[in-house]
Every structure is written in structure tokens, then in C-alpha cells.
Image: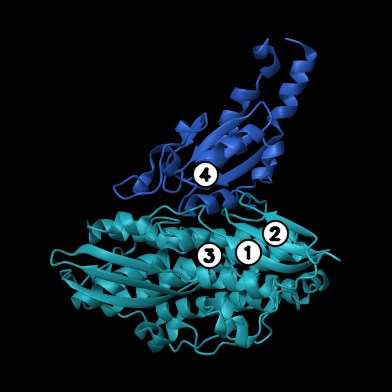
Chain colours: A blue, B cyan
Amino acid sequence: MSILQDIKNAVRSRSIHVAYVDVGSCNGCDIEVLACLAPRYDIEQYGIYVHNNPREADVLLVIGSVTPQWVDKLRDIWDKIPEPKVAVAIGNCPISGCVYARRGTLTSPPVEKYIPIAAQVPGCPPRPTEILNAILSVAPLIYKDYEEKQL
Amino acid sequence: MKKSVDVSIPLGPMHPCWKEPVRLKCETAGERVLKTEMELGYMKKGIERIMRGRPWQEVMFLAERVCGICSVIHNMVFIETMEEISDIAVPPRAAYLRVVVNELDRMASHLIANFSYCYTIEHETLAMYLLNTREIVLDNLERITGSRINTAYMIPGGVRFDLLPEDAAAMLADLVKVEEEMKRYVRIFETGPLIALRSKGIGFMSHEEAIRAHTVGPTARASGVEDSDLRLRHPTYRALGFTQITRTEGDNFARNMVRFQEVFQSIDLIRKCIETLPEGPIRGGGLCKAGETSYAGEAPRGELTYTIKTDEYGRVVDIAIRTPSIMNIEACAHTMIKGATSIADVTSTFISSDPCVACNER
């Protein structure tokens, strides 16, 4: 293992940029992701920054079962994110469709059909601490020794 | 010949300021916005189609998943519509407990709306203060109902859980804390010179325009539309002596101040409820019958109407939901944003009308 890789590992563990995309949820998971910003949970003390720009994101939080409008656009957003990247499904909707996966629905869950999902946080909606925990536990697994794994 | 439109600027569907996907297309001459068009449809899940043909026990949970921010009022209006169809009486204690939970939800919704506005005009300090205060409100909601967001607290003929005396005492203590903090934050908002530069006189909507665009809720009340709060017609709120808050400025500042003032009003209503909470059962029981009716209630964003037709087993045959945000954000696109002198004001004006896209498109 090289020194450069060590430095990269150390830096990346304290610098996780998050973008979130709502592909058709009830809004409940959205505001729980926003609640992570609150000083009570203080997402930034772990070095996580939420600024919703896919071009500089490391982690994409996908919220909601997929509506027809997002079928192609979700893939576009995923392609815009630079490597190394990881997608986390927040809530029941991207996992199974939750209450929307019934007769008459317009949505087409799960999100796994469109982009690769690394972690899932079930719940309707999950608590902010659970979302925080998921981001913190999945990000190091993906980024640790990323360059050496590529060789 | 000089071109009148310089650039067409698209905003969204994925935008740092917006919680939900929606697309705004602004035609501009320099920085001045000439025309705005709104493109909806990114969140259409077909929830009314899912609801059709299902028993009310299932539709009740679907109804509160129309919108996560104001889920309690969706639950409440659906249940009260079913009660009106089936002539089910609500015990007085349950009616008061509904008001308590509904007002807690309204506080949480207004706080996150004002958080979004402060975040959009880059006053991050005040935004974080408001978001932290919202957590205290959600704690109380969780203490009473057992859940932070989707509570499913109301059922035909009553509510699920009673309010224990120790929970009520803890809630009142928390409300004192919230009121003290909110007084400070409102002073920051009212007197901040930079907030005034970004808010006062920006995104103006006149009284006539507000009426012509059928705006509802805090957006209408900020433009001075009298008698536009449906809580004035709700029997429990009438018993509590509810009065409407109206401002006349009609700009971004007024819309946010209306929401701030309604938070204080909600605190007062909850206190009055706890003081005069009648003793008795919390569930009366009853049977859901066949019928068809339309019923409206006041959501945090305005008038919310459910039109339901049921069969004799209590199954929902047909349902139509009319949510408040659709009028507000269309009015926002066609009157408030038009004539904005800077593109930076477009996002803040749009957020000040408290858009809830999940409600709109269902």
C-alpha cells in the first residue's frame, strides 16, 4: 500500500459529498434527509456535505419509487457523478415501492433496475440517525484503497 | 431589430434549493424575468388510482402518504370526510386531541418552509436554528403518536392514543422553550437588514391577483385575502376562538411572517386545548357506510379538499383530492416571479410560496 493511497483514504473518510434525488416519494424521506442537517444530528461533523450537485457528489441518496419521468433521467444523473461513487436507497419506496407498488400505480420500482444500489435504508420514513449511519458505514467500504483495487 | 428575450433559463428538476423535483423555465431579458413557465409531472405516482376500490382501512394509510410534510392533515381530512359520509360522532376529547396533533404538524411544516426560505437566501444560521426547533416539535409529535412523520393518529370515531398527563406536561414545557426561541428568531428575521433586502418588496402579489389566481393558505393571507382560513369553519377551532392572521404586504417577507405568526398561534391553540381538554373516551366507534361527499380542511399550505364516494362495505369507489399548493405555485409562476429583477430572486420567491410538489402531483 502506497503513502499516497493512505493519504487518500484518510482524506476521503472525512470528506463525503452528498446529493439527493427524489424520484417520486411522498416527501417524508426528503425532509428526514434535510433533518440530518439540523444541529441535533449535525451531519457536517462527520465531514459530510449536502449540496445536491451530482457533478461533485460521492454519495447519491435515491428517494422514492421511480416515476415514468425519471426512468431515463435517473441514469443521466448517475452517469454525471464522478468515480468513485455509491448510491444509497433511502426508505421503503426505492427498495420495494412501499404503498405505491399496487394495482393502478404509475411507478415502476425498484431503483435497482436503473442504477446499482450499494446500501438500503428501510423505513417509512427512516430516522435521520439511520440515514446518517448508512452513509457513514457504506462510504468507507467503497472508497478504501479505491485506486489499488482498480489495478 | 432588438431581441426582446435574451436567454431562456431552465431551473430544475434537480436544484440545490429545491427539496422536490419541479422545472421552471424563465425567459429573461438581461437579469429581468419576463415570463415563467412551470413544468410539473416528475412526482406523479397515481395515488388516486391506487386508492380506488380499496377499503377505507387501506386508503387511510395511503392518504397520509400523499404528502410527508403535512401528513396529519391528509389523515384528518380523509377521516372527517368518512365520518361525514357515515354520520359518525367524535367524542369531544378526541376532537381536541386531533387539534393538538394537527397544530404540532402545522408548526413542523411552517418551520421547514421558513427553513427552506432562509436556506435559499443563504441565511444559514437562522435556517439551522429553525430546523433545530422543528426537531423539538417532532419530538412532541412522536411522544403523542409514536411516529415522527407518518402518524396515522386519527381513525373514524376518534383517535388511537390518549394524551397522558405526564406527556402533556412535557409538551407544555417544550412549547415554552419553542416560544422563547421563536421570539428570538422572528426578531432576527424582522430586523435583519440583509433579509429585508432579499425579502421586502420582492415577489409582490396584489390582493386582486391573489383572488384571481385562487391562491389559498398563507400565500393568500399574506396578500390580505380575508376569510381564507378554513379553520374558521371547523367546529373545534370555532370553540377554541380561532381568528385568522392576515397581512397586506404580499411580498416574500409577508409570506414568511404569516407562517411565523401562525406558529405562535398554533402554540396558543395547543395550550388552550390542553387547558380545556374534556374528560371521556377517545374512541366512539361506528360503521363506515355508503355515500358521497366533499369535505375540506385547512392544511399548512391552504385548503385541502377530499371528494369521496364509498359503497356499503366502506370501500372507496371514487376519490378526488384537491391540494393547496397547485394554485399557489401557479400563481407564483405567473404573478410573483414575473418582473423579478434578478434570477437569484426566482428561487427565493418560488420557495416563499411553500411549494409541495408531492401534494400537487400525487
Q: Is residue B245 left or right of residue A126?
A: right
Q: Which numbered mark, 1 or 3, is in the foreground of this view?
A: 1
Q: Give the distance between the C-alpha atoms of the residues marked 2 and 1, in whole angstroms.
A: 24 Å
- Upstream in sequence: badge 1 or badge 3: 1
Q: Can you name the residue that lies furthest to the left here?
A: B312
- Mark 1 element type: strand
Q: Position of residue B339 (x, y in %)?
A: 75, 73
Residue B183 visible in rendering: no
Q: Which residue is pictured at 53% across the width and 62% down the height? A: B356
Name the spot of residue B324 as percent of width and height, x first.
48, 71
Asked if marks 2 and 1 fall on the same chain, the answer is yes
Q: Residues within 10 Å of mark 2 (few under 14, many from 20)?
A: some
Residue at image mark 2 = B119
Disc 2 chain ID: B
- Foreground tag (2 vs 4): 4
Residue A78's label in the rendered image is none
Discs 1 and 3 lie in a common subunit: yes
